[in-house]
Each structure stands twice: as C-alpha cells, then as structure tokens.
Image: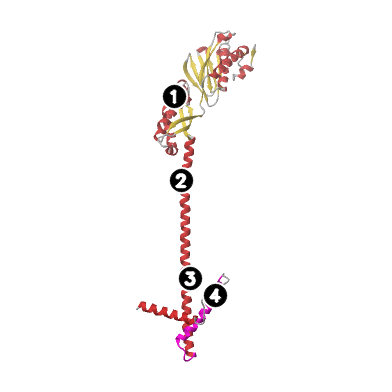
Amino acid sequence: MLRQSDGKRAGISQKRWIPSTECRELWQLVDRKINRLRKREGGKYLLPLNSREVGRKIFRKEVVVEVTGSNIQTQSRKQAREDICFLSIQSGPINRVGNMGNLFCCIKVEQSTVAIKGRFGKFDEVLEPGCHCMPWFLGSQLAGHLSLRLQQLDVKCETKTKDNVFVNVVASIQYRALANKASDAFYKLSNTRIQIQAYVFDVIRASVPKLNLDDVFEQKNEIAKAVEEELEKAMSAYGYEIVQTLIVDIEPDEHVKRAMNEINAAARLRVAANEKAEAEKIIQIKRAEGEAESKYLSGLGIARQRQAIVDGLRDSVLGFSVNVPGTTAKDVMDMVLVTQYFDTMKEIGAASKSSAVFIPHGPGAVRDIATQIRDGLLQASSHQH
C-alpha cells in the first residue's frame, strides 16, 4: 500500500510515493536506536541503518545523531527520518522502464543551510538552498546538511591569577561555517564545539595567570582579543569563521568577592572620615576667626567708651572749676569718684542673683578709694621713672 502523507511528513515532494509500511518500520527502528544514545556523553554519533533489519538488502546508510546532555536534538531525529524516506525511494523496485521517480530523488535544502553531496563515499559538491535531483543509480548520496547560521558557544574556564586567586572566566564565542569552505567544515571536524572549547581553555589559562585579579577585570578586552585571534587562526583551516569573542563574566571565589567589597568599603570610609575632619577644621577656623573679629570690635567699642568718659570728665572738671571759684581739681575728682562709686553699687545690687551682697562701706569709704587710686597712680609713675 502506498501513502502520500508519509512522504509529505518527511519533507519529500508530494509527487514521490513511499512504501508507508517500510517507512514506519524504519522510523520505529531509528527511534529505538536514538533512545539508546540518551545515556551517552554529548557529541555526534553515527547511527547505522541497515535494510536487512526490515527485510531488504538494497541499501545501507549511517545517520548522524547529535546528543546534547541528556537530550536528543529534534533536528537530528527529523533528519534521520528524511534520510530513511530518501533511502526508501532510492531502494524502491523499478516496476516500469522509464520510471524517473525511482531513478532520481529530489531533495530540499533549507535557507541558510547547505547540503553535502557525495558519490560512492567521496565528496562531490555542495548543494545550495533549493531543490536538487540526486541520481542514486550513479552513486550519488546525501552525506548531510551544514548550517550557515551564526552560532554561539559559552565556555566557562576556571583558572588562577598571578596573585593566586581562582576565578571562573566565561567566554562567549560567536562563529559560523563558511559557504565556500563547507566541505572542510563538514568533513574535517567531528565536533566543532569541543574543538573551540579546547582552544579557549588554552588561551585563557595562558593569559590570566600573568595578571593580578584587578588587572584581569581591566584587561578583559585584551583577553577576548587574544582568544579571538587564536581561534581565527586555528578554525579558518576547518572552514569556520570566528565572528566575535566576548568575555562576558569574571567570577572570583565568594570569599574573595566579600574581601574585595570590604576593602572597597574601608577605603571609602577612610575618605569620608578625612572629608569630615576637613569640614570640622574649617568650621573651627571660621568660628575662631569670628571670635577674634568679635573681640577686636568689642575692644574698639570699650576703647571708644573710655575715651568718651575721659573727655566727659575733663569737660566736667574744667566747667566745675570755672563755675565754682576756689575748687581744685582734686575736689572735682573726689566728687566724680563718689558718683561712680554709687553707680557701681547700684549695678551690683541690680545684677546680682544673690539675695544679699556684703561690701565694706563706711563714711570714709570714698576718701579711702580716692587715696588708693591716687597712691596707685603715684606708684605707677615712680616705676616708669
């Protein structure tokens, strides 16, 4: 029984009729074999498909299956089914002379992808995106597909700096296969990602140990440039172009990060303390300058006050001597002293916070005060001479 839906499901032209029973058996076979690869390490594996397992002896094919971690790439399973249907068409019996559907196979190549065509196991040509005929009776076969899209690989490398600090450096590699070197990219490398990872490890572990931890952060662009130059030189021979290399993360040990943060915090606290001390110094200087200016102005005021008092006393003595005949300057000074004495007593009584103030006082107090002032002036004059 022939079904068209199976061919349509595998991406074959709707005009190609495929034995549905055989395709279904082959699909079940490849599913069982692919599932066995789940426990293996990541990489690409050759999955042999032999027609003897389904009762035919015409074809033999190896399907490349890529395993990433514990997952099977969906594209690999889909490609395996396309190869199965393609082989079913190749191996179909020639029932009528001139049946071109059994002599040729039309394959479809997606955009940004190339197909590798071989003949009797040898590379023949690279098929561009579009529809192509594959004359199986001349030994032509589809070796596989190669994506030309930009791909990214993140590589995490642990290494040690010059000051004995272990860090994890994460490099992001953006690469793609070259269309004009598609055969080299397909045949020369079995696992491109592992090859790139090895070169990245080699360059990073040769560059970072020459730098201190702080220099690693400052010179990450130079490290990325060194990795890119080494990869470009190595991978160009295998048909790959290194578009860009970035150092996206530099992560030291958690204790080292905590210590670095504490050092930074202490430095900032020291700067803050210096600034605070400078501010207090400026405040004290300004306060002292203000007090000095205030005392200077206060002294000027007191000097002017005393000058005014002296001028007033002089005028009073002169006026009293003129208006009261027979009085001497001594009599006038005694009277002025008595007046100031009582003014002082009045101020003491008004300004004192105590309820009682004891001051020696008597009828001869004014005379005694005048005598003391006079004696003091005479002693001062004698010392000067």
How far apart are the alpha carbons under marks 4 and 2? Answer: 60 Å
The colour scheme used to paint the residues is secondary structure
Residue 192 x, y percent position in the rendering: 47, 24
The residue beneath circle 2 is: 267
The residue beneath circle 1 is: 238
Which callout, 4 or 2, points at the residue further toward the start of the chain?
2
**Mark 1 touches mark 2? (CB < 8 Å):** no
Where, by quadrant of the figure, is residue 166 drawn?
top left
Which callout, 3 or 4, points at the residue further toward the start of the chain?
3
Q: Residues within 10 Å of mark 3 (few under 14, many from 20)?
A: few
**Foreground residue among 139 and 358:** 358
Residue 50 x, y percent position in the rendering: 54, 11
How far apart are the alpha carbons under marks 1 and 2? Answer: 51 Å
The residue beneath circle 4 is: 347
Residue type, label 4: Glu
Q: Residues within 10 Å of mark 4 (few under 14, many from 20)?
A: few
Q: State whether the magenta stretch is mostly helix, strand or loop.
A: helix
Residue type, label 1: Tyr
| Residue 298, numbered label | 3
Q: Is residue 346 magenta?
A: yes
Q: Secondary structure at mark 1?
A: helix
How far apart are the alpha carbons under marks 1 and 3? Answer: 94 Å
